[in-house]
Image: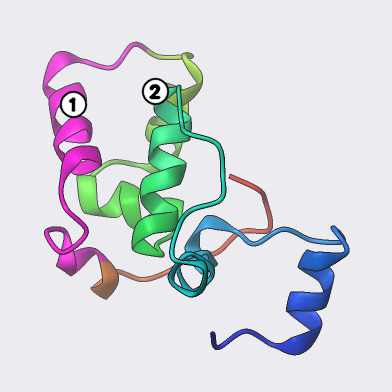
Amino acid sequence: MGIEKDTYANWETDNTKPVPAHYRPVVEFLGYDPTPVPTTLAERLKAKRRALGVTFHQVAQFLGWDTGTLTRYLNGTWQMPPGRGAQLDAFLTAGEAEPVQIHCLPRRLRRSNS
């Protein structure tokens, strides 16, 4: 899977959890995503990030938005304009092969569970 033995051991003992950007090999190895079905917009984005193996920062860049703006839309601090809502929905419903150029964007990983 391309994952270090210690990393796997930490996951198994619940010392750490895989971040969405590093989750793709796990899903490919298992053949399915073991996480609960997403119900909120934020959970849908997290599931899409896991499926693509990309960071939150890459998604924001792909959409042409600031990461803070995307965060505020997802947590309800700001109301998302209809045009941006349609743009985000198109990203979320696109097949895994469609947003290929997202993988070319810089990855800015943070130490969080988002």
Q: Label 1 near label 2: C-beta < 8 Å?
A: yes
Dividing the picture into quadrants, the one containing residue 92 is top left
Q: Is residue 84 left or right of residue 31?
A: left
The percent position of residue 89, horizontal first and vertical second, equals 20, 31
Instruction: Depth check: give the residue in front, 112 or 72.
Output: 112
Residue 99 at x, y = what percent?
16, 59
The amino acid type, in three-letter code, at marker 1 is Arg
| Residue in the image at 19% along x and 39% along y | 93
2 horizontally vs 79: left or right = right
- Examine the structure image and report whether residue 82 is included in the region drawn in magenta: yes
What label sits on residue 60 in the rendered view? none
Tell me the amino acid under the disc marked 2.
Tyr
Segment colored magenta = 79-102
Instruction: Assess whether residue 88 is covered by the magenta stretch.
Output: yes
Label 2 SS: helix
Q: Earlier in the sequence, mark 2 or mark 1?
A: 2
Q: Quadrant of the N terminus?
A: bottom right
Q: Position of residue 75 (x, y in %)?
A: 51, 21
Secondary structure category for the residue under label 1: helix
- Residue at image position (44%, 56%) is 50
The residue tagged 1 is 84
Tell me the quarter of the picture where residue 14 sits: bottom right
Query: Residue visible at 46% across and 31% down?
Result: 38
Q: CA distance from mark 2 to mark 1?
A: 10 Å
In this rendering, is residue 68 above or below 31?
Answer: above
Q: In the displayed structure, would residue 88 be above or below residue 10?
A: above
What main secondary structure does the magenta stretch of the protein show? Answer: helix
- Measuring from the top left, give residue 113's x and y in whole percent: 65, 48
| Identity of the residue drawn at 47% across and 33% down | 37
- Report the coloring of the rendering: rainbow
Viewer-side residue, 31 vs 69: 31
- Return the residue at label 2: 73
